[in-house]
Amino acid sequence: MNMEAAHQSHGNRLYLTVWVGLLALTIAEVILAYLAIPVTPMLILLVGFSLIKTGLIVAYFMHLRFEKLSLTLTLIPAVVICIALLFIFFPDSLRLLELRR
Amino acid sequence: MADMVSETRLSAWGGGRSPYAIGSNKLGMWLFLLSDTLTFSAMLIAYSFVRVASEDWPRPFEGFSIFMASVMTFCLLSSSLTMVMAVAAAKQKELRRTVGWLLATILGGVLFIILHTNEWLELIHEGVTPFGNPWGAPLFGASFFTLTGLHMTHVTGGVIYLGVIAWGFGKGKFTSEDVEISGLYWHFVDLVWMFIFPMVYLLSWKI
């Protein structure tokens, strides 16, 4: 049995499990925000949870896990590097904050 | 053709004329989503930039707004689930079930748009404009409306896209791959909201 057939026979249960996982992570995020912990750990946790959710959506809902590895290797590192490059200017926001004080 | 595809699965890069073993339409959608990812990343980073650089960033969302935003998140997440069900049904060539799941997905999107519009109107009613608001940093309005507005445009476009796909698939004009490609777009729209919800709403909760 190839991957696709194996995937289809367990498909619906897998999708439901992923959906429950996504809901649980979302609820965890809301609770976290309600606890109002300091902003830096909160930001790290919220973005971390969202990255896990992204992984679940891309891997299972968007089927990337069941595509050829070359597609993943072409798409994901490129987008990660580009997003990292977008952060180059970010430290300047702290300088701006100092200037405005 | 089938032989070529199964052969290409043997090694990651040994694809010959079909290096990714997917149709050109699907690859095109993936590349579009890649560029759209960068658009939304740039916007979220710009939003974070002005927020960090402002001392008096407003936190206008009360418990009820957060609750409604959570309901909107639930709508999008659940519409993603109905979307994968539509793709699975389309692969098994079940026309009616596919169209049914697609309509359920569209319903989720429409609910999202209605709730979101309602929230926009509320904020506008409270005096938020792109260049000012009653609470603090004036750029709050511009960044909020641009970010959520672009996302809502994507949801609206997605609802129309899925409507066309549902209509065409029901008439036999589109293949199951077309349904799958529209699914990729829809999941992406859901994915973007998974960042807007915590960064724009949860971090602006007035407690």
Image (cartoon, grey):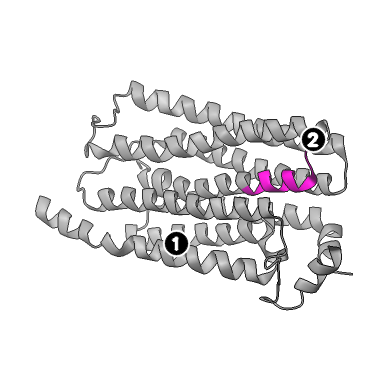
Front-lying residue, A62 or A24:
A62
Residue A95 quadrant: bottom left
**Mark 2: few, some, or many residues within 10 Å (few <14, many ≥20)?**
few
The label nearer to you, 2 versus 1, is 2
Image check: A8 left or right of A49? right
Q: Chain of mark 2?
A: B
Which quadrant would the N terminus of chain B be assigned to in this image?
A: bottom right
Q: Position of residue B90 (x, y in %)?
A: 82, 44
The secondary structure that most of the magenta stretch takes on is helix
At label 1, which amino acid type do we have?
A: Leu
- Residue farthest to the front, as pictured: B17
> What residue lies at 79% left-to-right and 35% top-to-bottom?
B173
Task: Give the label on residue B12, or none.
Answer: none
Give the numbered dot on residue B173: 2
Residue B198: give x, y in percent of width and height: 45, 49
Q: Is residue B127 left or right of residue B182?
A: left
Q: Which mark is residue A45?
A: 1
Q: Which residues are magenta?
A: B174-184
**On the rendered structure, is B22 left or right of B57?**
right
From the top left corner, tell me how far across and down residue A1 is, in percent: 89, 69
Q: Nearer the viewer, residue A90 or B9?
A: B9
* Crowd around label 1: few <14 · some 14–19 · many ≥20 (10 Å): some
Q: Residue at x 77, y 77 (%)?
A: B10
Left or right, B167 with reference to B195: right
